[in-house]
Structures are given as C-alpha cells and as structure tokens.
Amino acid sequence: MIEAENLTRTFGSLTAVNNLNLHIDKGEVFGFLGPNGAGKTTTIRMLACLIAPTRGTATVAGYNIQKDPLKVRQSVGILTENPSLYERLSAYENMDFFAQAYGVTDLVERRKRIQELLEFFHLWERRNDKVAGFSKGMKQKLAIVRATVHRPPVMFLDEPTAGLDPQSAKEIRDMMAELSVHEKCTILLSTHHLEDAEKLCNRVLIMNKGSVLLVGSPDELRQKTNEKPMVEIALKQVSSKILKTLDGVMAAEGVKQQENRLLISVKDTATATPEIVRSIVAADGDVLAVNALKPSLEEAYLKLIKGGEKQ
Amino acid sequence: MNMSKAWLVFKKDWTEIKRNWQVLLPIIIVPIIFSVVLPAIVLGISGTPIEDSQSGDFDTLIGILPLDVQAQLSNFNPNQIMVYIMVLYFFAPFFLIIPVMASSVLGSDSFAGERERKTIEALLATPLSDSELFMGKVLVSFIPAMLVTFVSFGIYTVLVDVMTYSMFNGILLLPNLNFLIIILGVAPVLALCSIGLTVMISAKVKGFKEAQQISVLLLIPVLGLVFGQISGLLVLGPLVLALLIGLFAVIDVVVFYLGVKVFQREEILSKPA
Ligand SMILES: Nc1ncnc2c1ncn2[C@@H]1O[C@H](COP(=O)(O)OP(=O)(O)OP(=O)(O)O)[C@@H](O)[C@H]1O
Ligand SMILES: [Mg+2]
C-alpha cells in the first residue's frame, strides 16, 4: 500500500530524511518512532505530497507521489503535526469544508458521515461551537475524524496521541485499531508514546537523524536489547530452602531477591514459569502472585537510539 | 480547474473573514470616510460663500479641464465651481484607494493569514489543485473588495445628488462617464494588481500584518493620482482612464504570472514558519 524507495529530503546542508526504504501492506498499522528532529514529519509530508523529495520516490495507494499527487492526496487522510483547524469556523463547518474538498459532494451522505464521526468522539453536541473554544484534546479528536471523512484507504497520523489524557489516548488508539481491522485502512503513525507502538502497531520503524535504525515488530525490537524475560514471584516469605531449590532448576538462569519477591531471569516465560512455581511450592513456599515480565520496549528504544548516536 | 472547487475555497475563506474584525474594520471604515464623511464635510462648508481670492486656486485645474466642461463652468458661481470640481474630480481617486486597500487587506488575510494560523498544511493536503486554491483565494480578495467599492460609490452618488440637487437647479452630478469608467474599469484592474502583489508578498513574509503593511505601499502610486489631481497636474478624463486601465491590465498579467509561480505547495511549506 505504501512503498518508498531511497526517499531523501535535504534542507540546505541538513539531511532530514536519508535514503528511506519502506514497504507497508494493506491494513497494516505501521509506527514511526524516533527522537525530536528524526525526520518523521518530513517523511509523512513527502508521502502526503506536501513537500517534494530531493531524491528517491514513493507510491501510496498505487499512485506515484511525483506523477499523480492529486490522486495520492485523494487516497490519503492526514493528521498533521499541528491540528490545522479553522478556529473561526465551527466543528461542523470545518468537517463540511474538508468533506467537500475531498469530494464528498452529496449533501445527505455528507451530513450522515459528519454526524457519525462527531458522535464517535462525543463532539456532536458541540458541532456548532467555534473550534477556537475547544480544548487541545477536542481539537486533536476533531482533526483525526476530519482525516477519515472521505474513508481514505491510507491514513498518515503525525503524533495522534500527543498531549492527550490517558482516556482520550485510548479512545484514539481504539479508533485506529477499528479502522485497521474493519475498514482495512493502512495506517502510518508517528509517535513518542511507546505504548501506542506496543498496543497498536504491527511493525515499527525507528529512525534518528534521518536514517533508519531498525524496522520490525515490537517483539522483534525487544529481542534486540539482549535483555532476558523475567518471572516475578511474590512470596509470603523467602526461605533459604527455596533459594537452594531454585539453584537446581535449569530454567531459572539467574535469581535476584528483593525482600519477599524473587526476580528470576529465564529464556522463555511460557515454559519456565510452571517449572519454577512447582519447585517453589515443593520447597514449602507460599506463592502470592506470579508475573511474567517482558523487557520493556522503552529500554530497547533507548538502547537503539544511543547505539545509533555513537556511530 | 474545477470552478466549484474554487468556489468552495471562496466560501470557506469568506465565512472566516466575516467573523474577523481585524479584516472587516478597515474595509468598512475607510470606504465610509471616503464616501460619506469627507464629502459631507466638503458639501457642508460649501454653503458658506467663498471669496474670489480662494477660488483662484481652482483656476489652474479649470484650465486643463476639457473645453466643454470649461464652458459649463463659466455659467457657475464660485461655490458651484468648487463643489463641482471637488465632487467630480478631487474625490475620484479615493474610489481607487478603496479597492486597492480592501483587496490587499483581504488578500493578506487569505494568503499570509492562512499560513500564519498554520491551517495551510491541512488545506494543501486536500486534493484541491494549486489553481483551484489560488483562484478561490483571489476571488475572496476580489469580490468583496469590488462589492465595497460599488456600495461606497452608490452611497457617494446618492449623497452628492441629494446635497447638490438644489444648488445645481435639479441637475444630477453623478453618475457620470468618468466615474463609471473608474468604478467599472480602473478599480477592477487595480484591485487585481494589488491582489497579485499581495500573493507574492504573502509568500515571503511571516504574517498577514507584514503582508498588509508592505502591500499598502501599492497605495503610493494611487495617492500620486490624488495629489496629481489636487495640484492640477493631472485630470482623470476618459483618455487618461483608458490608459490607466491598459497599463494596469499589463501589470496584472505580470504579477499574476509571478504570483501563480510563487503559490506552489512545495514553496509554501518548505519555508519554516
Ligand atoms: N521547512 C523546513 N526547513 C528547514 N528545516 C526543516 C524544515 N522542516 C524540517 N526541517 C528539519 O528537518 C529535520 C527533521 O524534522 P522533522 O520535523 O521531520 O522531525 P520529527 O521527527 O517530526 O521531529 P518531532 O518528533 O520533533 O516532531 C529537523 O532537523 C528539522 O529542523
Ligand atoms: Mg514531527
């Protein structure tokens, strides 16, 4: 659905995006991660035909960004970094203008679509209020539903959850998940929230200073850190008998004690956890809780960015 | 280019402008000053008879008026001459300042203002073509500016005719051919010229205020016409007006050619705001 080939953009002597190659399938949710100034917004702008690449090319929804820019724009719904709403117009007027600009000319259909979208984020009651009086979160939600008004097959969302409270961020994630699953919409989003990437993205791309550091699923990304998964076990009391028993358990590769909790590193939590719990019970341990811990995506991310910086 | 798409942009911009006092105030107040306040003052003081020495100031101006006009003036008393010249010649260039001022205020808001308010990116992401966007924004700068010009000329005509009706024994001074050429011919080409320049300036400056200030510089040649009229160097007769229309039409073509070149998606967003 989205293909990029050696996409490059320079501003004067600064290379904002350097030889980016991408292949994103239909219905995929693809995340762009990277520190400020990494080139995420610039990449999205090139793919949305807002700025021209200095070198390289791309196709979006089957159209070449250089040869068919109007068709690309027609196929894309975009949330820009700035919500980019007309503050002197009401929510409804904003939606109505963009719906028509994207070719939703039928009045009845347009009304129905706008109502449906505004209701989704509980903005319908506020439809006649000027956007100037909206909160940041309301603006963000309005800008997101605006992007979907013409049912685009491809969406570009530049930091969709930036500055939102956890509840609103979840609502927006749910919406993106629904678009991807039910409408087979291909979504490319940039984010600083690793939670978005973790919960939503099939694959993520990490970039820094215009270059791609890694592309892969969130799980693959975790594995890059060389950190092992862990099993966390809370006990009524940790006895020396339990520690001794664990010494003899092959699956428990390392044991750390923190008061009445044990942190045991393992190869694979699925196979190791039952065996470890069994042996603790056999050593008369009273198990209160068991928790399988994956290495955090955040650690993986920070490690990658640091590694990239040293090169 | 699809005109209905350009019209869509026009309607959107117009709805915004209607709610923006920073734009509405100048394009309402300046025309009121030119078409109501100043003429009312002049016609008000015309009731007091003027002395012969003062009327001499008009002699140079009368000297370069067309002969048939001079013949007509010879039958008038000094008060009538003063009113006649003020109302029909002295005020004429004000009706060129109105369209230039209004279209540059509207154009600055539509072009530079949209960029300054950071709404341009979503607009440029739509499948509206560059020419549809450009056309819509030119129309929203042009149509209200001309409307204001027509309305203020209408008010001016009624005011002048009512106040001078008895003084000139039932002759209606306005509308006359000169004014019709100014309003229907010179004003539109001049407004377009100001819009073209505003587009170019808007692409280079940060916000609509700067755009407005710089494009007001365009007023200088128009003010030149005002002072040319006052000092009697120049009289806006049909021939001069026809020349002006031709001159500005040529300038229009040039500034629009450059304006369209400047108004490109790539140019607009690659500049840091
Ligand atoms: N119009 C422009 N003119 C000059 N430099 C630019 C322009 N747009 C972006 N840049 C530069 O390109 C680089 C990448 O910027 P970009 O906005 O793509 O980063 P980003 O990954 O979106 O960052 P953030 O997370 O802060 O949004 C930055 O160094 C930025 O200064
Ligand atoms: Mg960005």
Image: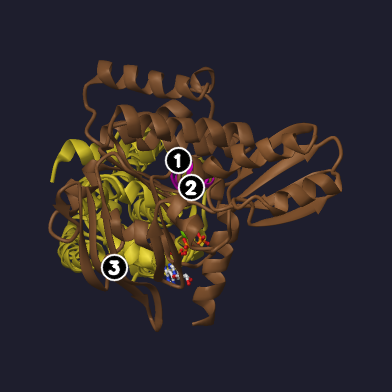
Q: Residues within 10 Å of mark 3 (few under 14, many from 20)?
A: few
Mark 2 and mark 3 on one chain: no
Q: Write down the residue under mark 1.
A: A200
| Residue A283 image offset from top left, x and y in percent | 77, 38
Q: In this image, B209 relative to A234: left or right?
A: left
Residue type of the residue flagged with mark 3: Gly
Task: Name the element at disc 2.
Answer: helix
Chain in yellow colour? B
Query: Is any atom of residue B196 visible in this view?
Result: no
Instruction: Give the labeled residue for mark 3.
Output: B63
Judging from the image, what secondary structure is the residue with disc 3 in? helix
Q: Which residue is mark 2?
A: A197
- Chain A's colour is brown
Chain containing the residue with disc 1: A
The reply to whether callout 2 and callout 1 are in contact (CB within 8 Å) is yes
SS assignment at label 1:
helix
The chain to which mark 3 is attached is B
Question: Between marks 2 and 3, how big is the CA–CA gap?
Answer: 83 Å
